[in-house]
Amino acid sequence: MTMDRSLKVQAGAIKTRNVMKRAERIARLQELDRWTEDSNVVGMPKVRVVKVSLKKKKKVKKEDDDKK
């Protein structure tokens, strides 16, 4: 049985998450030196999630096409 086209996830359709899991958040806080082993899990400081945006490539015009 095949899967319907509307149910397939395309590579460009994957969005960035704006919520981190607890382990990801602790790892990020450790990188920023804002987390110690004595820190409490309840009431953790907020962590900004960096969204990566891809720049579109500019099309380069061919000189041969412009001369004709």
Image (cartoon, rainbow, N blue to C red):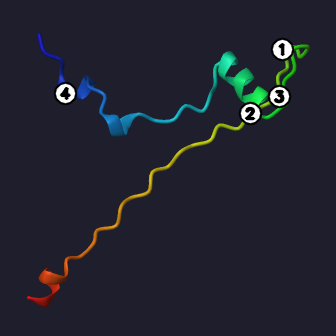
Question: Which residue is under mark 2?
Answer: 47
Is 2 left or right of 19, judged from the image as shown?
left
Indicate the amino acid at tag 4.
Arg
Mark 2: few, some, or many residues within 10 Å (few <14, many ≥20)?
some
Above or below: residue 21 compared with residue 28: above
Q: Secondary structure at mark 2?
A: loop
Taking the spot 87% from the left edge, 20% from the top edge, the residue there is 36
Q: Amino acid at mark 1?
A: Val
Q: Are marks 4 and 3 in contact (CB under 8 Å)?
A: no
- Which of pointers 4 and 2 lies earlier in the amino acid sequence? 4
The circle drawn on residue 45 is 3
Q: Residue furthest right?
A: 38
Residue occupied by mark 4: 5
Q: Nearer the viewer, mark 1 or mark 4?
A: 1
Q: Amino acid at mark 2?
A: Val
Q: Which residue is mark 1?
A: 42
Q: Nearer the viewer, mark 4 or mark 3?
A: 3
Disc 3 to disc 1, C-alpha distance: 9 Å
In the displayed structure image, the side of residue 47 where residue 35 appears, left or right: right
- First reached walking from the N terminus: tag 2 or tag 1: 1
In the rendering, at what x and y percent does residue 63 appear? Answer: 19, 82
Q: Is residue 44 left or right of residue 11?
A: right
Q: Give the class, few, some or many, for how many residues have Cα within 10 Å of label 4's Cα (few <14, many ≥20).
A: few
